[in-house]
């Protein structure tokens, strides 16, 4: 029995590698192109693979922008600014595709204020903390929500926390009064 040294696995061609990337998640043309070039594929092979994917309808920047905007807004709780930034800077989609996707989200009735309220309902702050409003508003701003949504949602959440604290304190006082009687 003879010993054969292990062989290198065959190098994947640009087409197969592109399909592998698309099987995991949607990619934009620029993002997929960069990935293929980074893996050492020639410009010609990369362009040929991308053209074939576009021709078959498997690579579509508008569809990718729409799917990712929904995922970022609903799944990760990003506001419109953060969604736009992520689509354009990280996913390399055109700003026109990103804007169209955000407009489509708005037309579908996506409520940015309701999303902000939901995010803040999970945040813990002390209502008597003088910096609580700023903490809540900055949190939403870091998630890409517009300034007016940040301010209103933070104010409303703080008011709710104060009301809950007052109601809880009133209940405790009533129980203390009952014990004395």
Image (tube, rainbow, N blue to C red):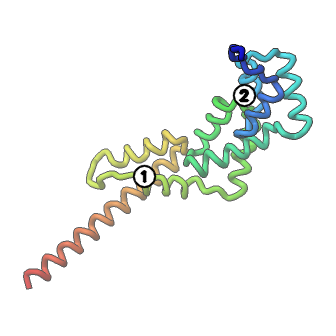
In the image, taking residue 24 as reference, residue 72 lies left or right, namely: left
Q: Position of residue 124 (x, y in %)?
A: 35, 52
Residue under numbered circle 2: 31
Q: Quadrant of residue 32?
A: top right
User: In the image, is 55 to the left or to the right of 69?
Assistant: right
Q: Which quadrant would residue 69 be assigned to in this image?
A: top right
**Residue that badge 1 annotates:** 154
Nearer-N-terminus badge (2/1): 2
**Above or below for 23 versus 31:** below
**Residue 100 location, quadrant:** top right
Q: Residue at x 73, y 22 (%)?
A: 34
Q: Badge 2: how crowded within 10 Å, few (<14), some, or many (20+)?
A: some
CB-based contact (under 8 Å), mark 2 and mark 1: no
From mark 2 to mark 1, how far is it between C-alphas? 36 Å
Q: Position of residue 103 (x, y in %)?
A: 72, 48
Dot 1 alpha-carbon crowd within 10 angstroms: few under 14, some 14 to 19, many 20 or more: many
Choose between 86 and 35: the one closer to the eye: 35
Q: How many marks?
A: 2
SS for tag 2? helix
Direction from residue 30 to residue 53 in the image, left or right: right
Taking the spot 37% from the left edge, 44% from the top edge, the residue there is 135
Viewport quadrant of the C terminus: bottom left
Residue visible at 58% across and 39% down? 82
- Where residue 160 sits in the image (x, y, percent)? 38, 62
Q: Position of residue 119 (x, y in %)?
A: 48, 53
Q: Residue at x 42, y 52 (%)?
A: 154
Image quarter (top left, top right, bottom left or bottom right) of the N terminus? top right
Q: Nearer the viewer, mark 2 or mark 1?
A: 2
In the image, farthest residue toward the front: 1
């Amino acid at each position: 029995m003879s010993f054969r040294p292990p062989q290198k696995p065959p190098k994947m061609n640009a087409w197969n590698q592109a399909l592998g990337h698309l099987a995991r998640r949607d990619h934009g043309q620029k993002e997929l192109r960069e990935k293929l070039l980074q893996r050492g594929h020639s410009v010609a092979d990369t362009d040929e693979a991308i053209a074939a994917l576009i021709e078959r309808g498997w690579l579509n920047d508008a569809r990718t922008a729409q799917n990712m905007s929904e995922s970022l807004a609903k799944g990760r709780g990003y506001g419109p600014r953060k969604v736009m930034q992520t689509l354009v800077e990280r996913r390399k989609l055109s700003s026109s595709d990103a804007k169209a996707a955000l407009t489509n989200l708005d037309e579908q009735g996506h409520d940015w204020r309701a999303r902000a309220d939901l995010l803040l309902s999970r945040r813990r702050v002390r209502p008597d903390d003088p910096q609580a409003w700023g903490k809540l508003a900055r949190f939403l701003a870091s998630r890409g929500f517009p300034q007016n949504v940040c301010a209103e949602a933070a104010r409303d959440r703080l008011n709710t926390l104060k009301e809950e604290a007052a109601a809880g304190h009133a209940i405790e006082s009533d129980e203390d009064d009952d014990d004395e009687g």
